[in-house]
Amino acid sequence: MSAALRVSLALGVLSALALGAALWLGPTPIENAFADDTATRTIVWEIRFPRALTAWLVGVALGLAGAALQGLLRNPLADAGVLGLSGFAALGAVIAFAFGFAAFAPLLALGFALLAAALVTALGWAARGPASLALIGIGLSSFAGGLIALALNLAPNPGALADLVNWTLGSVEGRSLSDAALVGAFLLAGCVLIAFAAPGLQALTLGEAAASAIGADIVRTRALVVLGAAACTGGATAVAGVIGFVGIAAPHLVRALSGHDPARLLAPSALAGGALLVCADLAVRVLPTDTELKLGVAAALVGGPVFALIAARLAARGDEA
Amino acid sequence: MSALLCLSAVSVVLGATRAIEEVSLDVARGQVIALLGPNGAGKTSLLRAALGLIAPSAGRVSLGGDDPRKLAARTRAMRAAYLPQRPRAVWPVSVENLVALGRFAYGAAPDRLSAADQDAVDAALRACALTHLRARRMDEISGGEKMRAHLARALAQQAPLLLLDEPSAGLDPAQALGVSDILRAQAELGGAVVFSTHDITLAARVADHVLLLREGRLIAEGAPETALTPEALRCAYGRKGRLEKIAGVCVAVFE
């Protein structure tokens, strides 16, 4: 059994355990999650399970998108958040919510994620080194942030502003099974696209010219990964708002255990993202705070230092990757 | 015998620079051809144009009878293997997995090798004296070993034509001679090699045909001893130089 498969299995078991724990643990104590009374059934199966499942699917989507983007851009600091895909997806959804097309939010989130992916690809393809790509991403994220502020500013219904701001902080609170189904469908599409790109990602280990010379179709690989990552990010952001750093942290956490091959890193990274987000959501639910901490805020509080740590280690190694 | 590669009056323009001007070259099986010239002479551009990685602004490139820019990437990879200048492994994969990437065109992945793929990988590792390092990570081996690993990757491709951009850069004299043995073996097995180098002595030793370039133009070509005259070397490098035979080996000497 390969190392990547072993890690994937272990993370699958961890995900199942975390999902199981999410049924039992929470502000309201539950003695038996499988009890047959109405109150328990409502709490466990209509509130906790859809929420935990949504968190897991969002984490899987972000972890997968992060690993695929890192492989494509050959940069361990790449992910949907850093590259501005999440920001643009959020912008799309905010526009939909603010101007009364809530039903089109997933579609707009996907469309805007694609737009950001196209911009990053166009602007950053020739960029060398983590700094320049991250800078392009920061630029796009800031731009998206500015446009979100503008959308909020111009929103015709001021009453919805608080909801919108809350939504952009990233959360899976109160999500239903239909939300889980939505992110699941986008994730499935992303998985298929990225799976087809996996051999190309392996070839890109050699850099673009040599990858092309060994027979990889770089244009196809690029298109598949960009579309796949946009689908994953668009779906995840449409349902849960902006949750950063999972895409960076998940591949980083499993790389040492499952090897550096960018194709073999995809499944473990996705599962690590899922397990990470279910655990993080469990943590924000059981933390004794007056107002529940938003999942996106918690992810940023943990993920920010992780990002800085990776960047510092790369800088110390003098890496150009 | 049909030409593996044919460049007919090829010119390449990169931005505002004329990288190559009307260079022609026919490569037949059994040949080892060295591209020589100072930095910026157009050696890399010539190799990249031969593979179709850059488009010629004039002239025609034919790789095994077809325009390489119109070939499917996998078909092209089965006709020519390419070693870029300063090759790198972005991720620290194992030496064996890096070499296995040479089997990409055959539908193989490093974790999914057929018996034929595995044989090709093993043979390439043996040829480059890397068998004992196969499990080591690319960031754990020396610069010379890295270069040999990338060369092994190109050999594992089992293409009849090798296009190598400075394959002996950064190698010690013994390892550079090892590379020249690999190039000769490729030619003797019915393949051909076009390689660029700054090591004129190595080129004179291994190549049966050299192209001396300067600012994209061909200064001289032919067998090393006839092409690399003092006039040609002076014209290319701007310094007085000559080939001298020492202990039966042609050595480039510059004053």
Image: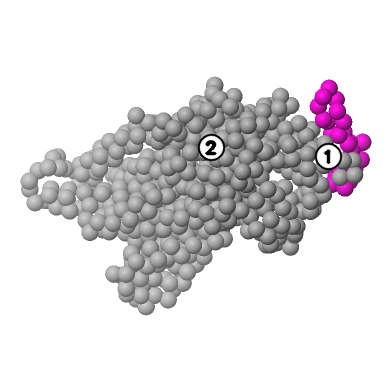
State the residue at coordinates (72%, 53%): B24
Taking the view exactly as shown, the residue that stands out farthest to the left is A36
State the residue at coordinates (21%, 56%): A177
In the rendered image, residue B118, in percent from the top left (x then y), is placed at 45, 30
Look at label 2 and name its amino acid: Gln
Viewer-proximal residue among A83 and A276:
A83
State the residue at coordinates (49%, 62%): A118
Nearer to us: label 2 or label 1: 1
Look at label 1 and name its amino acid: Thr
Instruction: Give the image quarter of residue A107.
Output: bottom left
Residue wearing tag 1: B226
Viewer-proximal residue among B50 and B13:
B50
Determine if the magenta segment contains residue B240.
yes
Instruction: Kindly tell me whether residue A253 is visible in this rendering.
Output: no
In the rendered image, residue A236, in percent from the top left (x then y), is placed at 35, 56
Q: Tell me where the magenta segment starts and ends, as one range.
A: B233-255
The answer to whether A119 is drawn above or below residue A268 in the figure is: below
Q: Is residue B82 left or right of residue A181?
A: right
Label 1 is found on which chain of the structure? Answer: B
Q: Earlier in the sequence, mark 2 or mark 1?
A: 2
Which quarter of the rendering shows the N terminus of chain B? Answer: top right
In the rendered image, residue B134, in percent from the top left (x then y), is placed at 52, 26
Residue wearing tag 2: B158
Q: What label does residue B33 carry, if any?
A: none
Determine if the magenta segment contains residue B8.
no
Disc 2 crowd rating (10 Å Cα; few below 14, some 14-19, many 20+) is: many
Disc 1 crowd rating (10 Å Cα; few below 14, some 14-19, many 20+) is: few
Q: Are marks 2 and 1 on the same chain?
A: yes
State the residue at coordinates (41%, 58%): A227
Which quarter of the rendering shows the C terminus of chain B? Answer: top right
Secondary structure state at the residue bearing disc 2: loop
In the rendered image, residue B8, in percent from the top left (x then y), is placed at 69, 56
